[in-house]
Image (spheres, helix red, strand yellow):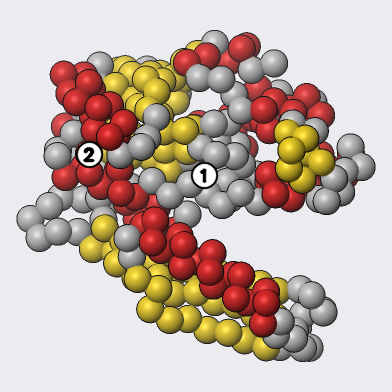
Amino acid sequence: MNVNDLVVQGAEPLTFLDYFACGKLDVGTVESFVEGVAEGCRQAGCALVGGETAEMPSMYADGEYDAAGTATGAIRRGDKLLPRKESMVAGDVLLGLQSNGVHSNGFSLVRKILEKEKLDVKDAAPWNKSVTVAESLLTPTRIYVKPCLEVHRRGLVKGMAHITGGGLLENVPRMLPDSLASEIDVSAWEMPAVFQWLQRAGDVTAAEMARVFNNGIGMVLVVPAAQVNEAESLLQEAGETSIRIGVLVERTGEACLLKKLESWK
């Protein structure tokens, strides 16, 4: 997740530091944690250069632990930071890159829904019986660094938004100038099963879903209309499935306009 926040600035992730705190050190748990971090670093092309392991029995109960991380990156000399707001115009295309689940946001609401449904994390997931609730919900956040850097270095993107807490409604406007808004057709992609179940089980409105979850889109790119085919081809070569989810329009009110929201039922 950290490295996705770096790449939207046009930065290449270089290093990662991890932090692991617990009451009593369990070697197996720490090994699993570090293995996961190392895999994430491989996917992002950055180095795991160190970190901190803290054992604090007065702070954590047995079996509990806390984990965190920090990523650093750099912009190539002569490159400009993203977003390039001054170059954005009405008609620029919004490409969405698919998420692989809830990612790292919305878990306060997720936990409330699980409690309401009396579901344990070890139960089979109602939206996918082949895995447990925990296995599905804790699927690591997709790392978009390499394909996003590729299209950025080709000069094909004007801005990128990592869709985290706040969903499309709050994250896409961060990369836009005050004169433009994003018009997004949410029927352009199918909401993944996990979000459909959360919406039904929690009786969550479509508007609230849009504010809390990524709903299947983990990254949004602003691409010039004349270069959208080239960007799509490059992303496909990098293993990404991109979806044309909308366009930029002149702003007359809200900064993010979600069309066909009624399709989220």
Q: Residues within 10 Å of mark 1 (few under 14, many from 20)?
A: many
Please name the residue shown 68% across and 33% down the image: 194
Q: CA distance from mark 1 to mark 2?
A: 21 Å
Whole-percent x and y of residue 144? 38, 46
Q: Amino acid at mark 2?
A: Val
Which of 178 and 103 lies nearest the eye of the viewer? 103
| Residue 77 appearing in the image | yes
Which of 55 and 42 lies nearest the eye of the viewer? 42
Answer with left or right where residue 6 lies relative to residue 194.
left
Location of residue 115 by image quarter: top right
Answer with left or right where residue 194 lies relative to residue 246.
right
Q: Quick one: SS at disc 2?
A: helix
Location of residue 225 by image quarter: top left
Q: Which residue is mark 1?
A: 164
Q: Which residue is mark 2?
A: 151
Q: Amino acid at mark 1?
A: Thr
Whole-percent x and y of residue 173? 40, 34
Can you say whether 74 is above or below 166 in the image? below
Label annotation for residue 262: none
N-term mark: 1 or 2: 2
Please name the residue shown 22% across and 44% down the image: 150
| Residue 182 appearing in the image | no
Extreme residue in the front direction? 130
Please name the residue shown 75% across and 84% down the image: 23
Answer with left or right where residue 79 lies relative to residue 246.
left
Which of 42 and 87 lies nearest the eye of the viewer? 42
Whole-percent x and y of residue 152? 21, 42
Q: Quadrant of the C terminus?
A: top right
Please name the residue shown 37% across and 28% down the image: 242
